[in-house]
Image: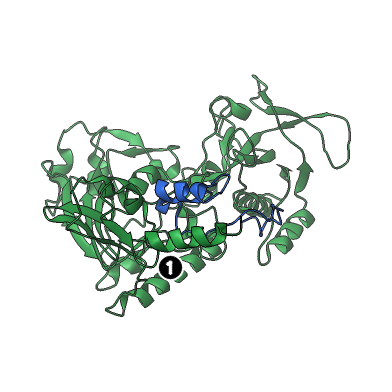
Chain colours: A blue, B green
Amino acid sequence: MAGTIRAQYPSTIRPIRINCTGRVTPSLMMRAIGKGADGVIVAG
Amino acid sequence: MLEAARTPGLNVYTYSEVEDVSGFVGNFNVKIRKRARYVNNDCNGCGACFDVCPAYGYDEFNEGMNPRKAIYVSFAQAVPSIAQIDMTRCIKCELCKGVCEVKAIDFDQEDEIVDVEVGSIIVATGWDEYEPETGYLGYNVYPNVITQMKLERILAPNGPTVGHLVRPSDGKKPEKILFIQCVGSRDLNMNTYCSAGVCCMISIKNSKLIKQHYPEMEISVAYMDIRAAGKDYEEYYTASRKEGIRYIRTNVSKIQEDPETQNLKIIIQNTLSSTRLKELEYDMVILSCAMVPAKGVEKIKGILKLETSQDGFFKEFHSRLNPIDTKIPGIVLAGASQSPKSIGESIAQGRAAASSLARLMWKDKYRILLIRATVDKDRCAKCGLCELNCPYDAIKTLADGAEVNEILCRGCGSCLANCPSEAITLRYYREPQYEKQIDAILEEI
């Protein structure tokens, strides 16, 4: 989405493709934060 | 329609309503309510009952502009050609019963529910004309302000005036006519969309038609932009200008009626020539209203579990790459159910919808992706949260645990994210696979 609208975003963002935002479990988000991520954006 | 009704193997249910749809692609069960006509199929449409019926209603086919009897055929080409009784108008005198030679009138008839098994469904619910608020541009207040649909019926040879163009207030032939475009469309307060140029083309068509019959009549079109995008449309528009139809680029904000003559006065400014405000007087004003989703779309949406876009039309799979399919396999859209469109575009989409379903139906197999939810029945606590959260109605809680219908399931994973006992997994998108991804991309931070 950011690509199609030519938006710039920082290189420190790490996208993971998930087939549906409904698939995201709290444990996945907590794991990312536990591994040192500053935040998690769920975008769909 | 007549041809469709005569085709063997094709059942046409008119004066009927879809009540419920269950199942999935290849195996839909549709419940159809055939509404009672109070006249059985023996009716041959002879019309003897119309003559004796003493009760009157308004003819919906002619936009309520002329009366019809309480027993009537909805319009001349109706399929099947069977009379029906409007029970809100009928006085139960039973005169029709006495005059009917084939004994077709049955006052005890009740709605009939028919169960039909079908493999796939095409939604072709069409559109309705936008109805302006009472008082907007004099609509419903001044008799000579009418909508495009009413004008269509007035101009029709089988319409209330047998094709004679007269204005509603006094039945006289108008000398000056104004068409106002974009009523209820391209307006932030009503509908933001443009009705795909259909209202522009209808105004051009009707103004040309009137000009052909009455060359001395003065016809103007007040427009924002003429959207004549389509094969031969621009040429048609240019031809209408050559014939003397006047196009005024303006925004009409108010119409006032002269109480004596019932003529309509408008104050407009031509925004192309930046002239001063001018007061113009017309005998008749036609509002070219937007196309809006047909009445009952909300009900069908609930029955088929479809979505609608912001404008209220059914949401397609992808507005540019796949405007025919819906998110549900086996249910496709045709014509103005998806968005406002012209006759040609509707036919194109209808045929595309039919052939895409033919391709789907003629094989006895249905191919699915393996990205589907699977349930570990030993872990399932049968709490029913997955069933509640499934947007596709694909999961059911049974006595021995939840069960996924692999055809309905689209592999979104909402069920497993909500499963408290972690009994559901999604093939190819399992939890450890995501955990590994998260670990790997966060390693360098």
- The image shows residue B442 at horizontal and vertical percentages of 56, 57
| Relative horizontal placement of residue B279, taking residue B55 as reference (left or right) | right
Label 1: state its secondary structure.
helix
Residue B350: quarter of image: bottom left
- The subunit letter for the residue under badge 1 reads B
| Relative horizontal placement of residue B244, taking residue B293 as reference (left or right) | right
Query: Nearest the camera: B252 or A30?
Result: A30
User: Which residue was labeled with disc 1?
Assistant: B353
- The image shows residue B426 at horizontal and vertical percentages of 34, 62
The answer to whether residue B277 is seen in the rendering is yes
| Relative horizontal placement of residue B303, taking residue A3 as reference (left or right) | left
Q: Amino acid at mark 1?
A: Ala
Q: Is residue B91 above or below residue B298?
A: above
| Relative horizontal placement of residue B290, taking residue B331 as reference (left or right) | right
Query: Nearest the camera: A13 or B309?
Result: A13
Mark 1, Cα crowd under 10 Å, few <14 / some 14-19 / many 20+, is many
Residue B143: quarter of image: top right
Q: Is residue B233 above or below residue B57?
A: below
